[in-house]
Image (cartoon, grey):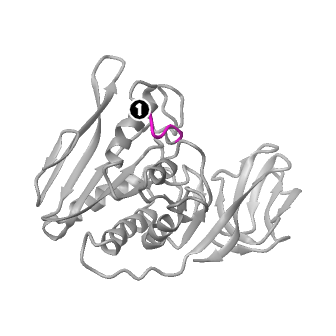
């Protein structure tokens, strides 16, 4: 029997339930939706979670499509799912947990006696620690972004190679290989000896079906590539960025992009122009170095200094 919260699954079974992480302001219990898919054959454990940022919904789109397709009769090992991690932010479609105004994915490994976010991350991290591999499904919030996978442990970490292998197997086509901030699950997992990646499945308001399908394919790539399911995986070459340049606007106005997401740009290439409401040019911003046009703001209007776009730099093929 494998248990996660109230979900109990014997070999060959699928179970859903709730993982209690505290109470709401009226004293009602808070339970995160969880699922256990327990294969008929023994094997490793994969942990998958989504929506640690409350407006990043493509991950739960992936989970909602993967779980019904997983047949425990064909599975070796176990897959644990937490479908929605940031309970409070999800309810109001906001990025941060409104109870403690924290970005939940900066609080791992958590604290069972801490703030709301720390208690949630403690509970989910205890589940993740049981696994041999961790997938933490994200997206570029509500901005526009390519589908990519992030390796956040840093190049000097003892699990760096294993995390890169996991990212390549997931096969989004792009990898950001850059040490992440403290408190990310993709940092805490490798510190526990568990290869962990942070797939960033595009960026959208609500769901984006193409990014969801890319994520579904990635999860099944991992399941096949690591022996949970039969089948061969031959991931293609990944474009890897080891740096990330962000660009703000030098003036207020309306942004007009000269590059498309995924374009390769050279130093000096125009990334975007800024005009006034009547089309009069106000500014032109160029790339500082060679890279891939990675992410942009969604709305065209900007104030002076406001974020506009990002370029992945220090590019190679992995």
Query: Residue drawn at (37%, 50%), measured in percent from left and top?
Result: 49
Classify mark 1: residues with Cα within 10 Å, few (<14), some (14-19) or many (20+): many
78, 22: nearer the viewer: 78
Work out which residue is located at the far front of the displayed protein and give it. Answer: 158
Residue 130: image x %, image y %?
31, 50
Residue at point 44%, 44% (across, down): 52
> What is the span of residues highlighted in magenta in the rendered image?
106-110
Q: Nearer the viewer, residue 141 or 192?
A: 192
264 or 169: nearer the eye?
A: 169
In screen coordinates, is 283 left or right of 212?
A: right
Q: In the picture shown, does residue 114 fall above or below 306?
A: above
What's the magenta bit mostly, secondary-structure-wise?
A: loop
Q: Is residue 264 left or right of residue 277?
A: left
The correct choice, above or below, for 264 with respect to 303 in the image is below
Q: Quadrant of residue 315?
A: bottom right
Q: Residue at x 66, y 65 (%)?
A: 242
Residue 57 in the image, given as x and y percentages of width and height: 43, 50
What residue would you read off at disc 1?
A: 88
- Is residue 261 in sight in this rendering? no
Residue 28: x %, y % from top left = 27, 22
Confirm whether residue 184 shows in the render: yes
Which residue occupies 68% across, 67% down? 293
* Helix, strand or loop for disc 1: helix
Q: Is residue 123 magenta?
A: no
Position of 95 relative to 267 (above/below): above
The C terminus lies in quadrant = bottom right
Whether residue 219 sits left or right of residue 253 in the image: it is left
């Amino acid at each position: 029997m494998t248990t996660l919260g109230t979900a109990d699954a014997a070999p060959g079974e699928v179970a859903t339930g709730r993982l209690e992480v505290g109470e709401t302001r009226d004293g009602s219990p808070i339970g995160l939706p969880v699922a256990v898919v327990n294969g008929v054959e023994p094997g490793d454990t994969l942990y998958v979670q989504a929506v640690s940022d409350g407006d990043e919904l493509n991950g739960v789109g992936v989970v909602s499509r993967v779980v019904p397709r997983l047949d425990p009769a064909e599975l070796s090992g176990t897959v644990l799912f937490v479908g929605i991690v940031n309970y409070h932010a999800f309810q109001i479609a906001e990025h941060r947990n409104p109870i403690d105004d924290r970005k939940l994915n900066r609080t791992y490994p958590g604290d069972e006696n801490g703030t709301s976010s720390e208690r949630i991350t403690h509970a989910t991290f205890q589940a993740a620690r049981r696994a041999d591999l961790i997938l933490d499904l994200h997206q570029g919030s509500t901005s526009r972004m390519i589908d990519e996978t992030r390796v956040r442990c840093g190049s000097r970490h003892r699990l760096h190679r294993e995390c890169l292998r996991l990212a390549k197997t997931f096969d989004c086509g792009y990898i950001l290989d850059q040490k992440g901030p403290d408190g990310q699950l993709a940092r805490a997992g490798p510190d526990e000896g568990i290869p962990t990646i942070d797939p960033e499945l595009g960026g959208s308001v609500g769901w984006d079906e193409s990014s969801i399908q890319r994520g579904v394919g990635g999860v099944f790539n991992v399941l096949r590539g690591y022996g949970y399911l039969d089948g061969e995986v031959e991931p293609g070459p990944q474009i890897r960025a080891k740096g990330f340049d962000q660009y703000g606007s030098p003036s207020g106005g309306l942004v007009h992009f000269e590059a498309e997401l995924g374009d390769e740009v050279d130093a000096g290439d125009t990334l975007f122009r800024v005009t006034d409401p009547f089309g009069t040019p106000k500014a032109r911003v160029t790339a500082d170095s060679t890279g891939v046009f990675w992410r942009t703001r969604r709305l065209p209007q900007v104030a002076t200094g406001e974020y506009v776009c990002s370029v992945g730099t220090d590019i190679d093929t992995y």
